[in-house]
Each structure stands twice: as structure tokens, then as C-alpha cells.
Amino acid sequence: MGGLKRQAAAGVSKLSPDGRTPEDQLALVRKAVVRLYGTLTAFWGDTLAPRLREQADIRILDYDALSPDQRASVDAYFQENIFSVLTPLAVDPGHPFPFISNLSLSLAITLHDPSDDTEHFARIKVPSNHDRWLALDAPRHFVPLEQVIAHNLDELFRGMEVRTVHAFRVTRNADIRRDEQEADDLLEMISEELRERRFAPVVRLEIEPEMPRKVRELLMDELQLDTDDLYESNSLLGHADCMRLAHFDLPEFSYAPWEPVVPPRLLREGDPAHLILLGRTADHPNIFSAIQESDILVHHPYDSFRESVQRFIEEAADDPDVLAIKQTLYRTADDSPIVQALIHAAEHGKQVAVLVEVKARFDEANNIEWGRQLEESGVHVTYGLVGLKTHAKVALVIRNEDDGPRTYCHIIATLAPATTTPRRPAAIPTWACSRATRTSATT
């Protein structure tokens, strides 16, 4: 949406491959998004919340539905933990409209000053570093933080009358223009792009249906939006916060834990569950011996990633005969064992080279941070290639053996249908691990 809006504003007349202008495409996208957004917001209130309540006694209650004791409890919590964090920001000739960060939840507040009979507008940001769902006295019962704040505004605006309070949320454009060919430093360019994205134009305003027209118009005017950028939510704003509810210990409503299979040649000694099942013992002292026998093809998530790819890197990091590890990184978890193994390898004197793709959309900041941590540990880091995005997941280990240095490789391949006839596509990636070859010492 952001890219199309930018093209339309710039007067771009070039047609898309199907013959549509940016304005034509915006109209089509808007039509589809409104339908999808309505389905999303209605599903929470009409389907999911009632089922959570009836079947698992998981409840997100409105503040108005709380008992007097529950209200007293959350009000006391507000005074002790929330009040001092909040920063009310007024909007008037002496105070410009405040910056609204991307995807943050805010309260739009209208006030009346009885001392001079004037009307005022203020905004409060709901703290994003605090759990949105405040626990009540019953297990798995919660009240939204924004509602607790809204019902305690008298503490923040003493001497003023609070007329209306409504939540809203903005989405900023993430489609930032870049010219890699003119960049002197790719890492610096991506870092600057992240700073620009933070202040990028707003492309969507989500509001509660009850928000007064005057407040809507004020927000749209200040954020430079029109009615096509306005979305009314039929339930909560920011449904991603509900993901916390998926982590309760409720086995009757959860998928059974998945236990991937360990490829037979990668079974470890002392693994009785697998050895009894197969009626055999482990044949190889390490993963490199197993790969020397022949290539190993593993298929995730059916075959264990931990006992194949992760083990491949971890054993290489620990093996005194390994000389070097070279690898690409596209996306990583916050506690990535692969990254930790690479750091461990570098700290123990191995040559480690990593290509960190800093253009992985929405993971740029994480990848830059990982790259810096790797560099601080002695890893040689390259931050992608100008004009290209490296999406391949590959690794190369060079190991010194009796007959000289030998390379071991890990390569990912994604299967696709071999025919153009419409059919269900292959959705599971296949990993090939690994290949043992002789190499010269200079490889």
C-alpha cells in the first residue's frame, strides 16, 4: 500500500503488467483489504472470544464488567505500576501533534476545562513494554490495559472533565526506496533505511467504531490521511497481542508435541528410544563420519533439524580438526543455537566467515545486531551483496583429515511440481546435508 500510495502521489502513470495505474491498483487492494479486515476483527468478537470463554474459561473482560473488588485491584495496580509511566500529550497551538510510532496503541482523549469553558485534545500512548492483559483474581481472566488507563484518566487530568476516550492505532509505510548501486556502505544504507521507516508516512489508521467524527477528522488531518485509509475494528485493536493466550498449558486444546525422526545414520550412541525402535546401534563416532559414507538427505520438519543441520554446525564448532566454517544467515531466532555455535567456533580459533543478509524484510535490525555480535567474537561478516538478496541457506565446513583437508557442505533445496498442471504445490522445504569432497588447503 505504501509503495502504491507513493507512486500515486508522484503522478506515476506507468501501467502495471495487467494494464492498471497505481490508482487502479490502490482501489482494488483497498476493496480486498476492507473485506479481509472486517473478517479478521469480527472473528475475534463473534467466534474466537466466545469459544475461549466457553471451552477453556479464557476471558478478556471489559473494565465495565468487573466486580467492585476487581476494579479496586486493577486501579491499585494502575497507581503503583502504570501511572508514573504515562505521558499525556496535549494538542493545541503551542503543542504540535505528537509523533505516533508504528503499530503502537494510543488513546485519543477529548477534555473540557470548566475554568474557562474550553475543549482540548490529548493523546496517551499505551505502554508497549508492559503486558497488555492485566491478570484478574480468577485464572486466565484479564482486562485490557488500555481500558484500565481510560477509567483512571481523572488522575492524569486533574481539574479537567474527560468527555471521550477511544483507542486508535497507526500503520506506517514499510516500503522504503533504496538505491543500492549508489550506496557507499550497504550496512549504513540499511541502518538509515530502518531510521527512515520509523518516521515513514502513515498508510492506515485503525479506530473504534464509536470514535466521534470530530476526533476522526482531527486524526486524519494531522496524519495526512483520507477516508480510504480509515479502518473501523469490530473488536480489539492489535489482535497480535492475543498470541499470549496460545501459550497456556491446556493440552486438551493444543497440538500434540511433534517429535521429528533422527535419520538412522545420525543416531547417537546412548539414545535408547531410537536404538530399541530400530534394533541397531549407532555406527558413526561423529556426523562427519556419517557423511563420508554418502550424502544424507533430510526432509524438515519430518527429519530432526537439531540432530542434522544444528548438529552439523555445533560439532564443527567443537571439533579440533575443523579449520573453517563458512555460512549464510537469512533469518535467525532470538536464541539461535546456530549463531551461538559460530561464535563458539570463532572464540576457539577457527576461521569463521558468515554472510548476513541485512535485506531480510522486517528482520533487518535483528540481523544487523547478530552481525555485530559475530564480528565482536572474531567472525568475518559480510552484510549481503549490492543489488542481490541472498536467500540461500548453505554452509561449508573445512576439516583436516588423514588424507588432507576435506570439505563438508549443507545445501537447502525447495521442491516444486515438475508439471504446469494445476496441483497442490510442495510446501515443505527439503534440506540436503551434506557432501564430503577433497579440497586443496587454499579453498
Image (spheres, rainbow, N blue to C red):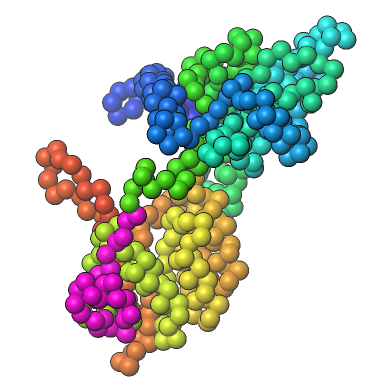
When the figure is inspected, residue 304 is found, relative to residue 147, above or below; the finding is below
Of 312 and 376, the residue lying toward us: 312
Decide if residue 59 is on the left or right side of residue 427.
right
Q: Which quadrant of the figure has residue 145?
A: top right
Task: Considering the whole magenta stretch, tell me its main secondary structure.
Answer: loop
Spot occupied by residue 298 in the image (x, y as percentages of width and height): 25, 64
| Magenta region | 257-285
Decide if residue 4 is on the left or right side of residue 127.
left
What residue is rendered at 39% in x and 26% in y?
A: 47
Whether residue 235 appears in this view of the structure is yes
Whether residue 100 appears in this view of the structure is no
Q: Which quadrant of the figure has residue 148?
A: top right
Q: Quadrant of the N terminus?
A: top left
Spot occupied by residue 273 in the image (x, y as percentages of width and height): 28, 72
Identity of the residue furthest to the bottom in this view: 402
What residue is rendered at 73% in x and 25% in y?
A: 152
Q: Is residue 398 magenta?
A: no
Spot occupied by residue 406 in the image (x, y as percentages of width and height): 32, 83
Spot occupied by residue 404 in the image (x, y as percentages of width and height): 33, 90
What residue is rendered at 61% in x and 40% in y?
A: 131
Of 166 and 279, the residue lying toward us: 279
Decide if residue 278 is on the left or right side of residue 47.
left
